[in-house]
Amino acid sequence: MGDPQGAPGADTISVVRNQFLEEENYPIIMGIKGGKCCLLCGMASEPQLQLEDKEIATISRSQSNALRFTFFNTPQGKTHHFLSASYPGWFLCTSQKSNNLLSLTNQLGQVNNTDFYFNRKN
């Protein structure tokens, strides 16, 4: 994710499909650091985006564990939205201010940026 030209600030994300959910919804599990640390929605009254030191391959093999790590990838032209599978209505977002962390919002495309460029790296 990051900007489309791979400029500073663009990050490499490892992605695997959640095989336990319907493929047409594009369910994915995302990791950083070569897939050794994965994004998840913490279990709370409101979702909290977290990173967990857990192998992406291990998560993708466990149906009971995979849902909280899963986001539905929704293409929107050249960009994508990422909807939490465990918290419907909550999307990955970044702030309009630079250097703010990735977080979650339930206000798609309003205050925070919910549009991401997602390019395949060969």
Image: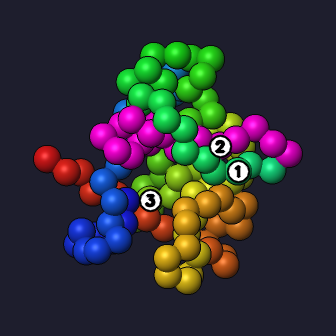
Q: Colour scheme of this structure image?
A: rainbow
- Residue located beneath label 2 in the image: 41
Asked if labels 2 and 1 touch by Cβ distance under 8 angstroms, the answer is yes
Give coordinates of residue 21: x percent, y percent: 53, 26
- Specify the amino acid type for callout 3: His
- Specify the amino acid type for callout 1: Gln
- Residue located beneath label 1 in the image: 48
Sequence-wise first label, 2 or 3: 2
Residue at mark 2 to residue at mark 3: CA–CA distance: 18 Å
Q: Is residue 41 above or below residue 97?
A: above
Queried whether the magenta region covers residue 47, the answer comes back as no
Queried whether the magenta region covers residue 34, the answer comes back as yes
Give coordinates of residue 82: x percent, y percent: 53, 52
Numbered range of the magenta stretch: 24-45
- Specify the amino acid type for callout 2: Cys
Camera-nearest label, 1 or 3: 1
**Residue 80 - label:** 3
